[in-house]
Amino acid sequence: MPDADSLDLTPVAAPPVPRRGRRRTIAVLVVLVLAMLALLSQGLLHSLNYFETIDQAMSARATLGTTTIRLEGIVKSHTIDRTSSGASFWMTGGKGQEVFVNAHGSPPQLFQANSPVVVVGHFTSSTSDRFDATQILVKHTASYIAAHPKRVKAPNGTTQ
């Protein structure tokens, strides 16, 4: 057995970490961050749900065909007909173009003539001015609520 005085007890430096390992780790992290950014941006872009104005939809009617879209316009006066399945009415666009809407389901409380609405549905054909809607959304701003506080009701029936 060697004697304690003959043993070399000086610290030995650890072997150097190869730079390739560090570079590889950084490269993997960069690829992961880029992949996450790409997924987030695609998810956000596809989750945005815009609407088409009547004028835009009428000019692109052939390409829209019968795909489901959101269509925005103003409810024309004296055209609302409440039906057993919902309501039918005419909507007008900014340039005077009109679309007949047959909406299924109960219209919202604030639905009325001369109000801006967005309807979700599709044209009956690529050449038709008739639109089958499954939902009616009434457009209004916070200034509407401030001006008409008794018209806006909470789900529990109280007015806001």
Image: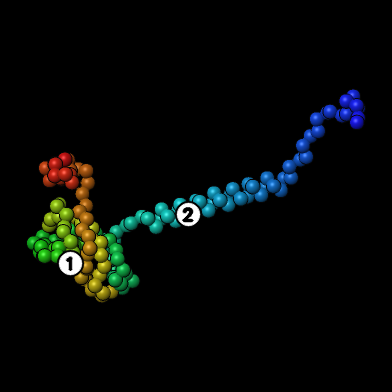
Q: Quadrant of residue 71?
A: bottom left
- The answer to whether 69 is drawn above or below residue 16 in the figure is below
**Residue at image mark 1:** 102
Q: Secondary structure at mark 2?
A: helix
Reply above or below: 37 against 57: above
Q: Position of residue 23 (x, y in %)?
A: 67, 47
Residue denoted by label 2: 39
Cα distance, mark 2 to mark 1?
Answer: 38 Å
Residue type at mark 1: give it: Asn
Q: Give me the residue at 20% from left, 58% from top.
A: 136
Q: Is residue 89 visible?
A: no
Q: Find residue 112 and report its horizontal and vertical position in percent.
A: 12, 55
Return the x and y of residue 135 as percentages of the image width and height: 22, 60
| Residue placed most toward the observer, 68 or 17 | 17
Return the x and y of residue 60 as percentages of the image width and height: 31, 69
Q: Earlier in the sequence, mark 2 or mark 1?
A: 2
* Pick the front one: 76 or 32: 32
